Amino acid sequence: MSTHPRFTVATASGHGLAEIAASLPLSLTPTGGAPQIAAVDGSAGWERRAGEALAGGALAAVVGPPTAHDDGGHLPDDAAGRVVVAWGFASNPGVLAAAEAAAALRGRAVLAECRVTVPDAGLVDAALLDALTACGRVFGAFGPVGTLVSGPAGQHCAGHLASGAPLALALVVSAAGPATLTLRLLTEDGGLTAHVPSAATAAPAEVRIVGPDGERLLPTRWETSRRASWRRAIAIAAGAQPPGTSPSSIARPRSSRPARTAEPTPEIRFDNNPFQYLNDEGLIMTASSTTFSRRGFLGLAAAAAAVPALAACGGGSASGGGNGEIKFWDMPWGTPAYNEAAKKLVEGYQPASGNLKASYQIIQWNNFYQTFSSAIASKTGPAVSTGGGFQAFQFDQQGQIAHADGVVDAMKKNGMYDDLLPGVLDPFKSANGYVAVPWQLDMRVFWYRKSLFDQAGVGLPKDWATLLEAGKALKKIGAFGFMTGAGAGNNYGNHSMIMMMVNNGGGVWSKDGQLDLMNDRNVEAVEFLFELRSNGIIDPACLGYTTDNMSAQWKDKKAGFGLFQVGVPQRVGDTSGDIMVADPIAGPHGDKATIVFPNNIMMYKNTPSQASSEAFLVNYLGQLKDLWQQKLMNSLPVFKSITQIPEFANDPNNVKIVKDWQPIAKTFAAQGSALNANLAALDGGQALNQFTQTVLSGQTDAKTALQTFQSSLQSVIKS
């Protein structure tokens, strides 16, 4: 009969050790003397304390989550292999499982993302150490990492994997919940996502693998990271391989490693500071000495396990074309069928002699700006892309955009320029050239349900006065006359605020682009919104409505009138003809206007061939008709010829939007017309979100709400 080895631990030497020992009764036994497995606090000086414990007879040591510090410390080589660092995230069994599953994906990776959230700014350094170690275990080796943005709210960093795929890392300070870590490794046909909860909770990590055959959830391990770390230490003390790890991912003395006479220790950098690999627990020493430094330890604690491969990792010189191709990044503008069709257009592109072919990659909306920023900073980004409505202006401000004047010239020669709807190109003209070219229009128009107006016995609104009258009539039959929403991920409430200002001849900006929220037209518009709210014409529950909730209100005949996108009947699932586009309404001074988001395609300076980028973009614009022919787009095309194809023109709502709404549409730049980078701070920013919540909840008054909005927005825009 075999016996299970037991090791002593001084349970009084650390908080929670008694519970750990009790959960591993066959392996650990409390002692008041010198322990066989030492618990070492992770505060400054832990290297010295761990070394002393091992020198004093301990077989292994478990170090609590280490802190970044400037104190020198030395961990002897013969001791390094007997130290286990109990990381809050990186030691979670789910991370170790993800590391094993990711091994087959790393060579095919197109993007790696890490997002860690902490509830307090004082936890940032430790969380970054922990997250970087987890990155190394799951993503493998990665190259130089640099900080893009750092401030009280967090930190954004960028680098690249050994394969050249971009690595994006975000650390966010938010008191909204406990600490969490999310890791994503994306490939062309799927990828891996790991959600790791706070070490303070017993909830397990979730690791999901997505591939051509669908999604699968890896087996769940209900074990805390701390308990898992102690089990690894027990295995080391027993002379066995720690469970759940591979031989290459265990901390071992350097003397047990293969000789590296032919391969120098790889150098890694964080914000241009050099560090070197010490052992697989993620311990990093500066390249020039054996002392830890705060910047060094904070820099790249995550070289874990895969550092030898890092020597082959370049310094971020990759261009916007892989293997001599123009990389085109696209967003999920509809169902997966849209991206499949767009990919076929790209892969079917046959360039003229001398120009390069193109490749297609989907970039998800979640954290998309961070993804682009990281890739562009590490020179692994696209040559051409779609993206956020104001993204091109943000990157143009950074000197990263290749202007599209050559594309516009080509469009003038081939007739595409004359085919554009009126005014759609003008917002993209800057003092230095065209920043991008439009390809679709995300319109905001009023819709109504005819049967509800018939039931209420009221006519369709023609102006604000009749909108108020119709809203009161609809309320009597249990419907709402100004449907909107401001729940999670829903910007229609925001858009309704700006649309009503613009519909009254106002807007956030003056004609010369200066912040101008306090003008009389805006005050009048917000006062009217307060009036709609006080009369019950705006649903009080709209503060929590997602876009799906709004769709449900339309489907359930609770919404009689309101602002929405193109294609509402199809979105709602009612194509009976009862839901229709309304006529534009006039403001108190006769103004008629709505808002539009002209989505665009941009080019980047980091391209293997600017001529090839331009040739591809001109060709792609010429193929867009195919997407509307397949009815894959919930937006207006920018070309008049596409608005005339049967698949589009057979819908009378589409025809009405093109005829009556598009000519009066204004951008978020109103009262001005030229788009700029500041609009990104407005669209979906906290200033606008808070303003919308204030108005829709009926708090305060119009002038106070606008003044607060202006002050908040002023603090985040660039003058």
Image: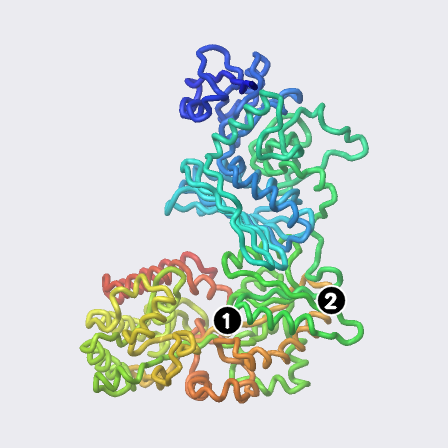
Q: Secondary structure at mark 1?
A: loop
- The residue identified by callout 2 is 609
Residue 646 seen: yes
Q: Position of residue 170 (x, y in %)?
A: 52, 48
Residue closer to the observer: 478 or 207: 207
Q: As rendered, which of 317 and 454 lies closer to the eye?
A: 454
Asked which quadrant contains residue 309, the reply is: top right
Q: Residue furthest top?
A: 33
Query: Seen from this angle, which residue lies furthest left?
Result: 476
Residue 160 got which mark? none
Residue, x 73% and y 69% (percent of image)?
Answer: 357
Q: Residues within 10 Å of mark 1 (few under 14, many from 20)?
A: many
The answer to which image quadrant residue 544 occupies is bottom left
What is the count of numbered marks?
2
671 relative to 332, above or below = below
Residue 671 visible in the displayed image: no
Hey, what amino acid is under mark 1? Leu
Please provide percent x and percent y for residue 543.
30, 63
The residue to which callout 1 is attached is 675
Where residue 275 appears, x then y in whole percent?
65, 35
